[in-house]
Image (spheres, coloured by chain):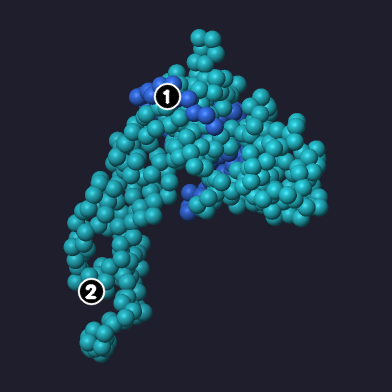
Amino acid sequence: MKRVVVETLHLQTEVLGDVSLGEACQLCHVEIEFVHALIEEGALELADGHSVLDRGQFARLRKAVRLHKDLGVNPPGVALALELMDQL
Amino acid sequence: MEYQDYYKTLGVERDADADSIKKAYRKLARKYHPDVSKEADAEVKFKQLNEAYEVLKDKEKRAAYDQLGHNWQAGQDFEPPPGWQPYGADPRQSGSTFEFEDFADLFGGMFGGAGRQQRTRPQASLDLHAALNLTLEELYNAKPVELYVRHPNTGEERQLRVKVPSHLRDGESFRLKGQGAKQGDRTGDLYVEIRLVPHPQFEVRGNDVHVRLPVTPWEAVLGAKIEVNTLGGVVNLTVPPRSQSGRSLRLPKRGLPGPQPGNQIVTLDVQVPTDLDSESLAHFEALAKSCNFDPRGKHQRERYEARRS
């Protein structure tokens, strides 16, 4: 593959802080119902009663979405898998 | 592209029916899914699996693939038949296949000889997603790392140098504003998910770094000062006298940095010498006669269990 590096940029990174549920769905390409189901299963926690996911929970959602889409696991299955992985 | 024996990859016979192919794929996908698997080359295996399944699950693609014959050796270059788009080659696909590609891209940059090259692909939005493999040392020291972003429209690559904030943890993301795809005067953002490469010595749990420390029986009994590696350098650890094997000692604030800095947790592992000379052995024999220590006695067991809990 031909690589044409046009410029090298030194960039400031911006840490993803709290992500709203809508934004999270958009970023993960997933339906809001899936997120709600995970919250109901207790596999995902909202930050202090607000409708936002903190950095760690958003990372967890990403993992959940991959398990769901790649392995065809439903929300209860995803919740179980995450819990078992937490125990490792 | 490189030839791969898809049947071998999935571990099925060449005349396997669609059901057994699906079954074999599902089983291996669970085994090698990079979020689940502990295997070092899980990403590579998972991508190969998906490439194989993408072709073998589709009647037409499978027939085209079968026509290639047995003349290819794995790794050899070959020209795919016309009209056959192998896995991950067509960015215009939509629906669930697209999502799959999304995943492949996420891990796509993690293997091959290209080093830290991250490939990205356009989404419905102009945002791009990439994964970045980081060693624990790179994260701890917040060393600038390079990533390459290929512009989906023009094929041009930009090299970005970024300092990954060291309070990020495995699976968490940061955003590079305006570094996504461009369309007219709209630009998307680039989201980078970091993946911590497993460390041979240190294990990360939350903000803490866990490490196992082998000690001699006499160090455990008499106590000792031992030099211990931490991410920030060598530190002197005091092992208190009469330390049981499995005892955890804490080095405060020697874990991962952040608003709540983690600790390093050192777990003692008493090792028994196996090749003793006769003089040392005589010491142990004398000890066996003179010492009335009984680890299975009621009193000792209670103390042991109290310490473990």
Q: Which secondary structure lies at badge 2?
A: helix
Q: Position of residue B289 (x, y in %)?
A: 25, 90
* Chain label for disc 1: B
Name which residue type carries label 2. Answer: Trp
The answer to whether tags 2 and 1 share a subunit is yes
Label annotation for residue B176: 1
Q: Residue at x 51, y 26 (%)?
A: B150
Q: Is residue A59 visible?
A: no
Residue identified by numbered label 2: B218
Q: Earlier in the sequence, mark 2 or mark 1?
A: 1
Categorize mark 1 by other alpha carbons within 10 Å: few (<14), some (14-19), many (20+).
Answer: many
**Direction top: furthest residue:** B185
Residue B94 at x, y percent in the picture: 68, 26
Look at the numbered disc 1 and give the secondary structure of its residue.
strand
Q: Find the distance from the CA under tag 2 to the CA under tag 1.
A: 54 Å
Q: Amino acid at mark 1?
A: Leu
- The colour applied to the residues of chain A in this rendering is blue
Residue A41: image quadrant is top right
Answer whether residue B88 is visible to the viewer in this image: yes
Quadrant occupied by the C terminus of chain B: bottom left
The chain containing the residue under callout 2 comes to B
Q: Where is residue B14 shown, x and y percent of the image?
A: 78, 52
Mark 2 vs mark 1, foreground winner is: 1
**With respect to residue B178, does B309 lie above or below?**
below
10 Å crowding of disc 2: few (<14), some (14-19), many (20+):
some
State which quadrant residue B206 falls in: top left
At 45% from the left and 30% from the top, the residue drawn is B148
Image height check: is A37 above or below B12?
A: above
The tint of chain B in the picture is cyan
